[in-house]
Image: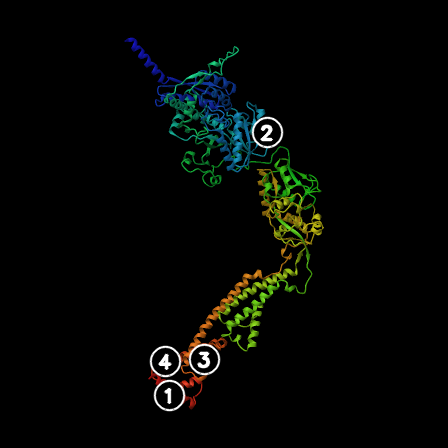
C-alpha cells in the first residue's frame, strides 16, 4: 500500500511541477550606466521591477529577476554583454539605449529568439522586417523628423543644415529628416557630419564649413553626452547670434531635464534654441513616480535628474512583465534548447554552446506585440509597424535659465498649442493651410540674439565663391542683353537685375558668365538646365517663364510681359475716288436702302390718317415718304410723329441708324488709312491654316510651342537670329525663300518694328508669358529677388529703366485696325435688321387690325341708317353684295382722316337711335321730318322732298299696322 501511495504522490508532484509557474523569470537590461539616459533609466528600471514584484495582479507567484549589463557606449562591449545575458537564459532584454548597439545586438536576439525592447534606440532603420525580435518602446525618429519638418514648414523656411553624429543613429535620423522635408517642399542643403568621439578641433571644422553655407536653420541630431560641446564651439564662431535658427532633437531635452536647475555653465550658449521632447501626458501615476524617483535618487545621492527616457524605461519593464504574464497564463513553459549552429571548435574557449535558444521566443514576441495598457508615457500599444500609437512631442524654447513650452506636435494633428490627448478627441487636422488658419500657431519664440523677429533662415553663402550668373551672348537684340566679357555685361535685363540686387538686405557678390559665341543665339532652355545642374547659380536675361523651365528651376516674379505675337509685311493702299462706298458691300447698301424705304412707308401708313404733315396730294405724300425715311439718317426729319405706333417704330429705326452710321464711319476711317497685308495672314487662325513658311527666333521656346501646341509642321519653320535676318526674310516673302510672317515675343517685335516701318503686328497676342530670372530649385534668393522686383515696380523704377532703353522714336503703330481692314456685309447687321423688320411688321399688323375694326363699324352703321335706299343706294348695296368696289371703298376709307371717320360713325349711331325712337311712337311729326331732312342734306328741304318723305313715313306706318 505504501509503495502505491508513493507512486501516486510522485505522479502528482510531477504533474504539479509541469503546470506550475516558475518562481522567478530572468530579464536582462543593457544600457550605459554613466550617461544622461542611463542614469535616469537605471533607477527607473529598478523601481519598475520593484513595483511589478509588489503587484499581485501581475505575475502572481513569480518574481522578475533583473540582470543588468553596462555597454559603456561601445558596440563591442554591447555584444559581449548581450552574449553574457544570453548565457543566463533571459526571456527578454530591455535596452540598449544606443541605436548603433541595437543594430548589432539585434542579430544576437534574432538567432536566440529573445525579444529586445529598446526604450532609447530611435533610429528608424531598426525595422521589424530586418530585426523581427526588436521592439521599440519609445518614439521613432521618423516621427521626430516629421515634427522638425513641420516646424520648418510653419516658419516657411526652405533649406536647413543638418548637423549630426556620423553613426547609425545620426545617419538614420537625417535620412528621415530629408524625406520629411521633401514632403513639405523643403530640403537639406548641407549635411555636416560629426565623427563619433570627435575632439573640439574636428567639431570646429565641421561647424565652420556649415557656417559658410546659405542656410541659417541648423538641425542638430547628436548624442546627449557629447552634444553640448557643439553649442560652445558655435558660440565662439558667432553662430548663436541673431539671424540663426537652431532646432535640436530630443537629446537636448534629456540633458536639460537631467541637469540641476542651478547649473548655468552652458545656459548662455543655448539661448533661443527650439528643442523637441517626447510628450508624456500628465497623470496621477506619473506624478507619483516622479516623487518616488526623486526620493530614491536623493537617498542614493544621485545628482542627475529624471528625463523622458526614464518614463519609457519604466513602461518597458511593465510591458515585459505583462507579456510574460500572458505567456505563462496561456500554458506556455519557459524552456531553452541548444542551438546546433553554435558549438566550440578547434579548442575554442568561448563556450558558445552555453548560448541557448528560447523555445517560446516567438510566442513571447507575439504576447509583447499585443501589449495594451496605459503607462507613464500614455497608451502603450503597438501598431502594425511596431511603432507606439499616438507619437507626440513637446516643442520647447530655451530662454533664460530654463525652457518654456511653446506648443506640441503629434502625428495626429501636427503642430498645435493644445495638448495632443485633447486633440485626439477631435477630428484630425491634416491640412497645413487649415492649421495655420486655426489653432496651430506656436507661442512666440525668443530666437538667438534675444530677438522675437522670426529669422529669414538663410543668407548668401560665405564660401568665397561669387554667384555664377549666366547671361545669353546673342547675335542680336543687344538692347536687352549685351555681353562684352564678365565685367562688361549691359542691357535692359541686366539693369533690372542689378537694381533688384541693390534692394536685397545683404550683399551678393556675383560674376556674369556669358553663354554663347555671339554669332548664333544660344539655347535658352539649355542655360536653364545649367542652372538646374548646378553649373550656374542663376540665369539672367530675356528668359521667358515657360512650363519646361519651371519644372527644373525656379523663376522670379516677371518683370515684363512678353507674349507671342505675329508680325507680317504690309503695303499702303493707293487712294480711290470711290473709297466712300467701300465700307459696305453691295448687298449691304441694297438692304440698307430698302430698309430706309420700308420704314418710311410704314411710318407714312401709321401717320397718314391722323397727321396733317403726312396728308395732301399723292405727289406730296410720295415726296414725304422719301424725304422722311432718308432724312432720319442725319436726324434732320421735320415731320412730327403723332401715333404711338409711329413713334415706337421711329425710335427703333433711329437706334438702327445710329449703329449703321457709327459702323460706316469706323470702317471708312480704317479704309482710308488701311495697309493691306502682302501674304494674307491676318491672325493666328490664318497662320495655322496656311502652308506658308513661318520665321522664329533661334534658341527660344517659340519653335517648341508652334510644333507642340499649334501643331504646325516643323518643315514650315525657319530659324532666324538677327533683326536684319527678320527684315530680309519678310521682304523676300515665301515665294523668294523668305517667310510669310514671324512669330516672336512682343518685346523683340517692338524693337524690330522700331527699325523697320513696312511691317506690322497682325492679330492679337495669343500667349501671356513674362520674363523672369532663373534660379536653382528652392533657392531662397528667388523669393527675395521677386520681392525686390515688386518694389521696383511699385516705386516706378522698373518703368524708368524701360524708358531709358526704349525711348527712341518709333515709326510703328500698335493700332491693329490699320492692318487688313474688311468691308461690312449684311451678316454683320442681320440681327439688327431682323429686329427692325419685325418691329415694322408688328406695327403694321396692329394698324391693320385697327383699320379692319373701324371699317367694320363704319360699314355697319351705314347699312343700318339706309333702311329704304334710293335707286343709287340700292345699286351700291348690290355692288357691295357682289364684292365689286369693296377694295376701293376700303382704300377710300383708309385715306379718310380718322377724326372724320369717328365723327361719321358717331353721327350714324345717333341717327340709328333716333330712328328706333320714331318707330316706337308710330311715326314722326312733320317738323321732325323736316328737321331730319335738313340734317341729312345740310339745307332746307324742297317741297318735293317733303312730299316724298311724307309718303315714305306713310308707308312705314302702314307696314307697322
For the residues labelled 2 and 4, the Cα–Cα distance comes to: 129 Å
Disc 1 marks which residue? 926
Can residue 596 be seen in the rendering of this structure? yes
> Quick one: label 3 or label 4, which is nearer the N terminus?
3
> Quick one: label 3 or label 1, which is nearer the N terminus?
3
At numbered mark 3, what does the secondary structure look like: helix, strand or loop?
Answer: helix
Marks 2/4 in contact by CB < 8 Å: the verdict is no
Disc 2 marks which residue? 208
Furthest-bottom residue in this view: 943
The picture places residue 516, in percent across and down from the top left corner, at 69, 40
The picture places residue 278, in percent across and down from the top left corner, at 46, 30
| Residue at 68% across, 62% down | 575
For the residues labelled 3 and 1, the Cα–Cα distance comes to: 32 Å
Furthest-front residue in this view: 882
The picture places residue 208, in percent across and down from the top left corner, at 59, 29
510, above or below 753, in the image? above
For the residues labelled 2 and 3, the Cα–Cα distance comes to: 128 Å
> Quick one: label 1 or label 4, which is nearer the N terminus?
4
Left of 762 or right of it: where is 84?
A: left
Can you tell which mark lies on residue 916?
Answer: 4
Q: Nearer the viewer, mark 3 or mark 1?
A: 3
The picture places residue 462, in percent across and down from the top left corner, at 61, 33
For the residues labelled 1 and 2, the Cα–Cα distance comes to: 142 Å
> Quick one: label 1 or label 2, which is nearer the N terminus?
2
549, above or below 867, in the image? above
Along the line of sight, the residue nearer the viewer: 103 or 254? 103
Q: Quadrant of the N terminus?
A: top left
Q: Quadrant of the C terminus?
A: bottom left
Amino acid at each position: 500500500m505504501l509503495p502505491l501511495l508513493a507512486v501516486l504522490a510522485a505522479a502528482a508532484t510531477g504533474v504539479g511541477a509541469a503546470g506550475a509557474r516558475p518562481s522567478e523569470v530572468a530579464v536582462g537590461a543593457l544600457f550605459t550606466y554613466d550617461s544622461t539616459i542611463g542614469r535616469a533609466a537605471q533607477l527607473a528600471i529598478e523601481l519598475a521591477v520593484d513595483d511589478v514584484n509588489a503587484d499581485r495582479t501581475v505575475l502572481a507567484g513569480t518574481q522578475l529577476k533583473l540582470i543588468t549589463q553596462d555597454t559603456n557606449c561601445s558596440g563591442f562591449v554591447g555584444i559581449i554583454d548581450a552574449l553574457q545575458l544570453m548565457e543566463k537564459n533571459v526571456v527578454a532584454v530591455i535596452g540598449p539605449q544606443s541605436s548603433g548597439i541595437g543594430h548589432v545586438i539585434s542579430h544576437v536576439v534574432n538567432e536566440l529568439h529573445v525579444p529586445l525592447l529598446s526604450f532609447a534606440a530611435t533610429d528608424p532603420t531598426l525595422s521589424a522586417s530586418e530585426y523581427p525580435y526588436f521592439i521599440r518602446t519609445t518614439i521613432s525618429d521618423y516621427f521626430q523628423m516629421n515634427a522638425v519638418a513641420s516646424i520648418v514648414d510653419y516658419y516657411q523656411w526652405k533649406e536647413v543644415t543638418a548637423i549630426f553624429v556620423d553613426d547609425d543613429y545620426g545617419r538614420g535620423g537625417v535620412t528621415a529628416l530629408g524625406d520629411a522635408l521633401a514632403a513639405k517642399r523643403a530640403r537639406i542643403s548641407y549635411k555636416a557630419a560629426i565623427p563619433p568621439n570627435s575632439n573640439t578641433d574636428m567639431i570646429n571644422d565641421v561647424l565652420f564649413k556649415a557656417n559658410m553655407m546659405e542656410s541659417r536653420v541648423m538641425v542638430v541630431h547628436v548624442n546627449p553626452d557629447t552634444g553640448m560641446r557643439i553649442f560652445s564651439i558655435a558660440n565662439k564662431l558667432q553662430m548663436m547670434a541673431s539671424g540663426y535658427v537652431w532646432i535640436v532633437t530630443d537629446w537636448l531635452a534629456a540633458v536639460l531635464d537631467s541637469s540641476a536647475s542651478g547649473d548655468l555653465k552652458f545656459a548662455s550658449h543655448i539661448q533661443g534654441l527650439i528643442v523637441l521632447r517626447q510628450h508624456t501626458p500628465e497623470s496621477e501615476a506619473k506624478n507619483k513616480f516622479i516623487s518616488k524617483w526623486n526620493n530614491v535618487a536623493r537617498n542614493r545621492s544621485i545628482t542627475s535628474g529624471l528625463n523622458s527616457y526614464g518614463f519609457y524605461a519604466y513602461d518597458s519593464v511593465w510591458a515585459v512583465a505583462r507579456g510574460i504574464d500572458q505567456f505563462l497564463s496561456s500554458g506556455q513553459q519557459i524552456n531553452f534548447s541548444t542551438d546546433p549552429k553554435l558549438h566550440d571548435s578547434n579548442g575554442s574557449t568561448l563556450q558558445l554552446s552555453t548560448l541557448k535558444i528560447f523555445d517560446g521566443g516567438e510566442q513571447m514576441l507575439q504576447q509583447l506585440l499585443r501589449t495594451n495598457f496605459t503607462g507613464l508615457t500614455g497608451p502603450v500599444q503597438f501598431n502594425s509597424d511596431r511603432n507606439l500609437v499616438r507619437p507626440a512631442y513637446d516643442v520647447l524654447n530655451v530662454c533664460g535659465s530654463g525652457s518654456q513650452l511653446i506648443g506640441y506636435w503629434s502625428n495626429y494633428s501636427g503642430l498645435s498649442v493644445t495638448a495632443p490627448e485633447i486633440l485626439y478627441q477631435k477630428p484630425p487636422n491634416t491640412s497645413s493651410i487649415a492649421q495655420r488658419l486655426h489653432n496651430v500657431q506656436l507661442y512666440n519664440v525668443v530666437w538667438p540674439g534675444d530677438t522675437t523677429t522670426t529669422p529669414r533662415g538663410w543668407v548668401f553663402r560665405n564660401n568665397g565663391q561669387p554667384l555664377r550668373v549666366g547671361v545669353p551672348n546673342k547675335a542680336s537684340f543687344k538692347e536687352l542683353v549685351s555681353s562684352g566679357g564678365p565685367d562688361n555685361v549691359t542691357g535692359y535685363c541686366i539693369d533690372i537685375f542689378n537694381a533688384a540686387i541693390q534692394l536685397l538686405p545683404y550683399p551678393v557678390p556675383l560674376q556674369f558668365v556669358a553663354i554663347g559665341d555671339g554669332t548664333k543665339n544660344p539655347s535658352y532652355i539649355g542655360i536653364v538646365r545649367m542652372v538646374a545642374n548646378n553649373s550656374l547659380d542663376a540665369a539672367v536675361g530675356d528668359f521667358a517663364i515657360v512650363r519646361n523651365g519651371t519644372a527644373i528651376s525656379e523663376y522670379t516674379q516677371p518683370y515684363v510681359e512678353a507674349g507671342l505675337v505675329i508680325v507680317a509685311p504690309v503695303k499702303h493702299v493707293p487712294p480711290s475716288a470711290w473709297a466712300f462706298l467701300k465700307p459696305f458691300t453691295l448687298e449691304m447698301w441694297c438692304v440698307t436702302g430698302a430698309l430706309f424705304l420700308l420704314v418710311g412707308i410704314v411710318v407714312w401708313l401709321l401717320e397718314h390718317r391722323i397727321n396733317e404733315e403726312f396728308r395732301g396730294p399723292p405727289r406730296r405724300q410720295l415726296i414725304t415718304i422719301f424725304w422722311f425715311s432718308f432724312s432720319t439718317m442725319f436726324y434732320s426729319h421735320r415731320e412730327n410723329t403723332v401715333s404711338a405706333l409711329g413713334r415706337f417704330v421711329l425710335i427703333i429705326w433711329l437706334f438702327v441708324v445710329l449703329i449703321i452710321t457709327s459702323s460706316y464711319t469706323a470702317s471708312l476711317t480704317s479704309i482710308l488709312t488701311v495697309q493691306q497685308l502682302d501674304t494674307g495672314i491676318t491672325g493666328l487662325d490664318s497662320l495655322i491654316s496656311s502652308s506658308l513658311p513661318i520665321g522664329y527666333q533661334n534658341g527660344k521656346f517659340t519653335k517648341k510651342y508652334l510644333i507642340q501646341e499649334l501643331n504646325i509642321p516643323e518643315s514650315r519653320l525657319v530659324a532666324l537670329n538677327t533683326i536684319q535676318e527678320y527684315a530680309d526674310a519678310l521682304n523676300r516673302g515665301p515665294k523668294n525663300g523668305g517667310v510669310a510672317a514671324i512669330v516672336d515675343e512682343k518685346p523683340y517685335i517692338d524693337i524690330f518694328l522700331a527699325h523697320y516701318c513696312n511691317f506690322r503686328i497682325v492679330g492679337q497676342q495669343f500667349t501671356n508669358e513674362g520674363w523672369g530670372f532663373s534660379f536653382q530649385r528652392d533657392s531662397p534668393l528667388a523669393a527675395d529677388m521677386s520681392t525686390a522686383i515688386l518694389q521696383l515696380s511699385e516705386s516706378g523704377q522698373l518703368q524708368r529703366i524701360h524708358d531709358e532703353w526704349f525711348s527712341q522714336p518709333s515709326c510703328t503703330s500698335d493700332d491693329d485696325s490699320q492692318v487688313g481692314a474688311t468691308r461690312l456685309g449684311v451678316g454683320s447687321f442681320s440681327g439688327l435688321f431682323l429686329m427692325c423688320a419685325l418691329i415694322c411688321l408688328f406695327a403694321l399688323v396692329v394698324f391693320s387690325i385697327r383699320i379692319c375694326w373701324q371699317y367694320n363699324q363704319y360699314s355697319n352703321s351705314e347699312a343700318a341708317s339706309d333702311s329704304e335706299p334710293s335707286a343709287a343706294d340700292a345699286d351700291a348695296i348690290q355692288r357691295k353684295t357682289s364684292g365689286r368696289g369693296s377694295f376701293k371703298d376700303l382704300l377710300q376709307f383708309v385715306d379718310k382722316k380718322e377724326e372724320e371717320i369717328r365723327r361719321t360713325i358717331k353721327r350714324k349711331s345717333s341717327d340709328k337711335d333716333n330712328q328706333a325712337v320714331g318707330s316706337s311712337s308710330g311715326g314722326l311729326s312733320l317738323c321732325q321730318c323736316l328737321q331730319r331732312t335738313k340734317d341729312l342734306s345740310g339745307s332746307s328741304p324742297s317741297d318735293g322732298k317733303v312730299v316724298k318723305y311724307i309718303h315714305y313715313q306713310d308707308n312705314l306706318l302702314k307696314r307697322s299696322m
